[in-house]
Amino acid sequence: MRVIGIETSCDETAVAVYDEARGLLAHRLYSQIALHQAYGGVVPELASRDHVRRLVPLVREALATARSGPDTIDGVAYTAGPGLIGALLVGAGFARSLAYAWGRPAVAIHHLEGHLLAPLLEPHPPAFPFIALLVSGGHTQLVDVLGVGRYRILGQTLDDAAGEAFDKTAKVLGLPYPGGPALAQCAEHGRAERFHFPRPMLDRPGLDFSFSGLKTAALVALAGRIVNDEVRADVARGFQEAVIDTLAEKSRRALVASDRRRLVVAGGVGANQRLRERLGEMARRLGAELYFPRTEFCTDNGAMIAFAGALRLAAGERQGLAIHATSSWELADLRPALPT
Ligand code: KG4
Ligand code: ZN
């Protein structure tokens, strides 16, 4: 089973070819960072238009690298949601048409399922079941993953996602888009103890999160100060520690409550080095194992979509000719992939 995967849910155009027997054969990504930088965030219409420009060349490149073509590709997987609807429609329309033209099946993939399964692309993949900490720009969830498509949401953010909190706080600090990596870099030279940030929801039982207050806490910390590099770094560090403390403690509670000993970290914030370290320490103390995708597969990519598509197509999933795209789609609504 060899599958081409197409991802266009936000500001990255990504294409990959995954082969069940031989692994990942090619992955290509075009990031729109430069396009959106002047606006300080993603402009949906510009994102859609750029996906139109990039898709065909990226597909050609990926197929050439994978030495694959219509005769050797068994199916087409595409991100159908959640995400920016215009951007999704570009990828979905293109992918569905490609499958039709090649006479191959297509499968619509949930973007977050792609993120959840991305660690399975690594050399030592986690076995099911595991707890997943899904931390992206739009979502923050703790999920009990029983198998492909068998997801039980244990807790989630009540307001901003962790990545969104990074992005908003970065803006407050005057850091460039994309805010998450910029803030993480700035925090490297900061002192954690200078500004105290609250640890939201840690004083309560349960596995939900709340991050919207941290942006306000950053604004309060900056009020009346001359914002030089030192202040910026200290606020960034204080903020980052608060987010990471919260994510680590709630992940620990999820492992204990579910009696699982495998934790998977997925989504863009999973690229954060300090978060990885802290989760590693927590897991070690608990005797649990920590898994994460390589950094480039934490953020959006085509490999995770090709991989999820291969699993679902191999399980016999097929879709009709309709083009599927939806901006909101609950992970818990997914159906299990049928066993092969
Ligand atoms: O998974 P992703 O690429 O896209 C979504 O599906 O949302 O996640 C993007 C998010 C953004 O909010 C970005 O700021 C954040 O992940 N991010 C980071 C880091 N790299 C990306 N946040 C903190 N530290 C990082 N190193
Ligand atoms: Zn994502």
Image (cartoon, rainbow, N blue to C red):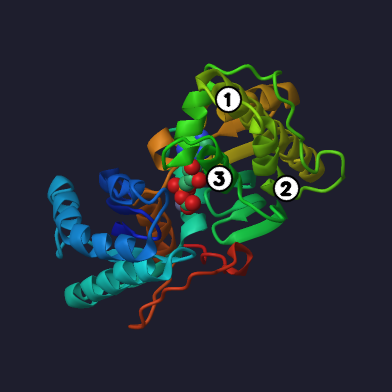
Q: What is the number of the mark on residue 168? A: 3
Is 337 displayed left or right of 61 in the figure?
right
Whole-Å distance between the Cαs marked 2 and 1?
32 Å
State which mark lies toward you, 3 or 2. Answer: 3
Whole-Å distance between the Cαs marked 3 and 2?
16 Å
Task: Name the outermost residue toward the right.
Answer: 204
Is 233 displayed left or right of 314 in the figure?
right
Which comes before the other along the chain, label 3 or label 2? 3
Q: Which residue is mark 1?
A: 226
Is 292 displayed left or right of 246 in the figure?
left
Q: Callout 1: helix, strand or loop?
A: loop
Residue 156 location, x and y as percent?
69, 53
Query: Which residue is found at the position 28% from the left and 69% from the top?
Result: 95
Q: Callout 2: helix, strand or loop?
A: loop
Q: Is mark 2 within 8 Å of ligand 1?
A: no
Labelled pair 2, 1 in contact (Cβ < 8 Å): no
The answer, for residue 213, to whether it is visible in the render is yes
Whole-Å distance between the Cαs marked 1 and 3?
20 Å
Q: Please state which of residues 11 and 223 is positioned toward the viewer in this rendering.
A: 223
Q: What is the number of the mark on residue 89? A: none
State which mark lies toward you, 1 or 3. Answer: 1
Above or below, comparing residue 292 to residue 37 in the picture: above
Query: Which residue is found at the position 78% from the left and 39% from the top?
Result: 253
Q: Which residue is mark 2?
A: 209
Q: Please state which of residues 327 and 190 is positioned toward the viewer in this rendering.
A: 190
Residue 188 location, x and y as percent?
52, 20
Amino acid type at image mark 2: Phe
Which comes before the other along the chain, label 1 or label 3? 3
Label 2 packing within 10 angstroms: few (<14), some (14-19), many (20+): many
